[in-house]
Image: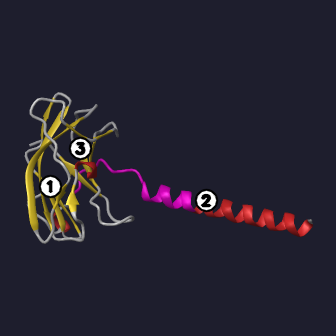
Amino acid sequence: MGRRLLTAVGVASGLLVAALIAGGAYMALKAPLSTQPNSALQPDNCSPGPCANVNGYVIWISNVTVNADIVRMPLKFQNSSGATHAAPEDLQLIDQGRRSSIPITDAAGCKTFARHEFAGGAVFGPIDVCFRVSNSTAPFILHWTPDLGTFCCEKDITVWPT
């Protein structure tokens, strides 16, 4: 009986330690995003900025405009990576109030795009994408999560209205 109890306590302790380690790793991956301008866009090996290059998958943002609570921006993608597609689910805009928004279609002139399959250096876009924000004070952060595997990659791109 004592041996059985000792085994159960050992297993429970091991599971608790594993859960704590997993929780700590998850929190480390979800560190707070900086709202400070990113002056390191050019070393990202893409231009003209703002842009980001994640393992050969590049996104360019241009002509960012703000009208009331709508932020509009044309996006262009070029894919020379292991990713297979561009999708609106890969994009979020974070405002100064730390609220995130997904692409919207319910405002005049705002479009979205369906998942687009492409690779081998192909280009997709530009496509006009809009986000609804609760705080229209610039800068904004475009949070991009291209599909390059389970633990790869997230990119935060600071964007300013033109």
Q: Of the residues tagged 2 and 3, which is closer to the observer?
A: 2
- The residues tagged by marks 2 and 1 sit, at their Cα atoms, a distance apart of 39 Å
Residue 39 lies in the magenta stretch: yes
Q: Is residue 118 visible in this depiction of the protein?
A: yes
Q: Which residue is mark 1?
A: 50
Q: Which residue is mark 3?
A: 140
- Badge 3 marks a residue whose secondary structure is strand
Reply above or below: 124 against 112.
Answer: below
Judge the density around disc 3: few (<14), some (14-19), many (≥20) Cα neighbours within 10 Å: many
Residue 59 lies in the magenta stretch: no
**Quadrant including the C terminus:** top left
Reply above or below: 107 against 155.
Answer: above
- The residues tagged by marks 1 and 3 sit, at their Cα atoms, a distance apart of 12 Å
Quarter residue 38 falls in: bottom left
Is the residue under label 3 in contact with that under label 2 (CB below 8 Å)? Answer: no
Pointer 2 or 3: first along the chain: 2
Q: In the image, 123: left or right of 29? A: left
